[in-house]
Image: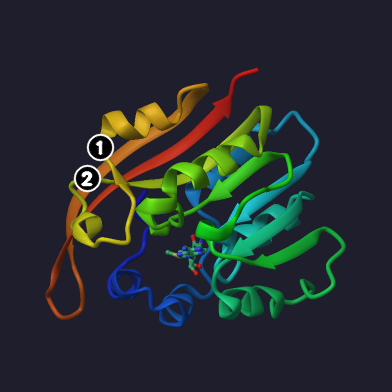
Amino acid sequence: MSENDPQPPTFIYGATRDWPGYFASVAGKPARETLLFALDRFENERPGDAIDLGCGEGRDTQELLNRGWNVLAIDGSQEGVDLLLSRPGLEGHPNLTTRVSTFESLDSLPKVRLLNASFSVPFCHPDHFERFWKVMTGAIVAGGRFAGQLFGDRDSWATIPDRSHQSRAEAERLFRGFDLEMFDEEERDKQDFQGIEKRWHVYHVVARKRG
Ligand SMILES: C[S@@+](CC[C@H](N)C(=O)[O-])C[C@H]1O[C@@H](n2cnc3c(N)ncnc32)[C@H](O)[C@@H]1O
């Protein structure tokens, strides 16, 4: 999963939640591999409704729209949503709805066949995580899929109090009721441009909800 990962210095922005800095550093990057993997799994089905949760500046939303999905793109950052809408053809796109909302304040979501959440779920505050997870997974119809990342308990950011990280067993438990189509655990050290080490401990997940 190296090509699509946050690379130095990109990842430093996530440490401090400097989302405008992050959006600038990922501008022009292609869709995430977890999303592409999930889309391949829908190959024989017609595109339907999707949510891109923590859509940021829209790399995944763009791919979903290109492939004919109806997308509800949600992010806590107005700047992210503004950047998404500034992509050519996306302002007023008939298949796109945007919403600025924090994960912590989301209390309902429409039913969808694909819920994409790339590198975003771990930024939900732990006090709200359980409810958020229920709302999020409750939005996926039987046979639908989750695509995205969770962060592990050995990740450097696991000690930041407002992050939600899971051990492998906890992460697997969260997907009870799903069949795991991808569950890639990645653990490696990286340096930012100042030489500061960060340990990445990430689960890359695509999971299909059972009927
Ligand atoms: C690391 S970025 C990932 C963005 C995009 N999905 C991608 O793959 O590049 C995390 C995204 O989650 C959003 N985010 C972080 N915490 C959030 C929260 N508590 N509620 C809503 N959105 C949040 C940020 O604004 C940002 O767009």
Residue 162 or residue 88, whichever sits in front: 162
Corner quadrant of residue 65: bottom right
For marks 2 and 1 on the same chain, the one whose residue lies earlier in the sequence: 2
Which residue is disc 1 drawn over? 167
Residue 179 x/y as whole percent: 50, 22
Q: Secondary structure at mark 1?
A: loop
Residue 200 x/y as whole percent: 24, 54
Left or right, 164 with reference to 28 = left
Residue at (55% x, 57% y) in the render? 31
Where does the C terminus fall, quadrant-wise? top right
Q: Residues within 10 Å of mark 2 (few under 14, many from 20)?
A: some
Above or below for 37 versus 143? below
Labelled pair 2, 1 in contact (Cβ < 8 Å): yes
Which residue is disc 2 drawn over? 153
Residue at (31% x, 32% y) in the render? 170
Left or right, 162 with reference to 65 = left
